[in-house]
Image: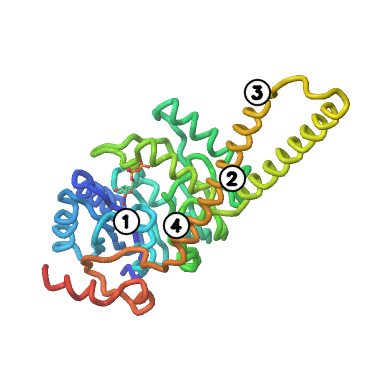
Amino acid sequence: MKNRLISIIIPSYNESNNIEIIYDAITNECLDIDYNFEILFINDGSTDNTLNLIKKLESTNANVKYISFTRNFGKEVALLAGFQHVSGEAVIVMDADLQHPCNLIKPFIHGYEEGYHQVIAQRNRKGENRLRACFSSIYYGLVNKIVDVEIKNGVGDFRLLSRKAVEALLLLNEGNRFSKGLFSWIGLSQKTIYYDNISRKNGKSKWSISMLFNYGIDGIISFNNRPLRICFYSGAFILFLSLLYIFINLFFIITNGITEPGYFTIMSAVLFLGGIQLLCLGVIGEYIGRIYYETKHRPHYLIQETNISTGENYEHTQPRIYKIHHRGHH
Ligand code: UDP
Ligand code: MG
């Protein structure tokens, strides 16, 4: 008799080609495991047939759970909803697109049984676009110099978390969620498992170049105010240089008189300082933007429908009307 439960969270955004395949793959993989499984699909505002396919699975399999958002809220928020609603003693997070191989589930559980709170899958970048792989490694090198937590290249959300780790994540209530950093921030004992990169099977990645850039900035800014510091110091340094320049010139002017109109020097000083100022304003603006979003205290997401009875704990994030209003429709 299996009486222990492991939950699998799958954020899904327009994954109609993958839902059934991933479900079958997971069930096959889990046949001979000593745990019960629940699979929680988070339908993140898909515009294709994803929700219907999930519901079809749900109607014949009691271990399929789903939460469907009112619109697309993003993967990070989908994960948050997942963590809030799973009940397993350990939780596995994986993508719907089959890039996260199911045969890691057993090693995950093995690591969990050894007592690790996080069992982390780390991929190499085999078969990935050279340029992208190169940018990634430069980026991770840079980020790890700046932020307080360690963020490894090739480590994503694909991992197993113990109940304790999940509870810890739920304590981090920020709206602007940079999961990679949060997983690292909570600490706890960790084991890493390595695997080969797999390219996406069906559908296409939801990441555009500009989204990757924005994600990169989030990664740097979400964790501390060091970029603000950098602004401050570089500003102070530039100010010092320009004061030096002014005094030296003043000295020359006093001793020699004005020899040149000085157009070039003035222009370059103005442009240079203008650039620095804009840069600093931008960084300050970023932080103020964060403050702005956090102070609104909006719910992180809204649920359109679900087959889970949502607990009292998270009632504050979910106004009742949204759950009840739509429930009658299926
Ligand atoms: N995803 C999501 N909401 C989004 C974008 C993506 O839930 O707004 C899901 C998507 O369905 C997939 C996972 O997050 O299961 C990873 O997305 P994707 O494959 O596009 O990212 P990549 O693997 O390229 O990093
Ligand atoms: Mg993918």
Disc 1: CA contacts within 10 A as few (<14), some (14-19) or many (>=20):
some
Q: Is mark 4 within 8 Å of ligand 1?
A: no
| Disc 3 versus disc 1: nearer the observer | 3
Q: Amino acid at mark 3?
A: Phe
x, y percent for residue 129: 40, 27
Q: Label 3, on which residue? A: 264
Q: Earlier in the sequence, mark 3 or mark 2?
A: 3
Q: Earlier in the sequence, mark 1 or mark 4?
A: 1
Q: Earlier in the sequence, mark 2 or mark 1?
A: 1
- Give the structural element (helix, strand or loop) at label 1: loop
Q: Nearer the viewer, residue 266 or 170?
A: 266
x, y percent for residue 323: 23, 73
Tell me whether circle 3 and circle 2 mark residues in contact (CB < 8 Å). Answer: no
Disc 2: CA contacts within 10 A as few (<14), some (14-19) or many (>=20):
many
Disc 4: CA contacts within 10 A as few (<14), some (14-19) or many (>=20):
some
Q: Label 2, on which residue? A: 280
Q: Quadrant of the C terminus?
A: bottom left
Could you give the CA–CA distance between mark 2 and mark 1, rounded to whole angstroms? 30 Å
| Disc 3 versus disc 4: nearer the observer | 3
Tell me whether circle 3 and circle 4 mark residues in contact (CB < 8 Å). Answer: no
Pick out the residue farthest to the front: 257
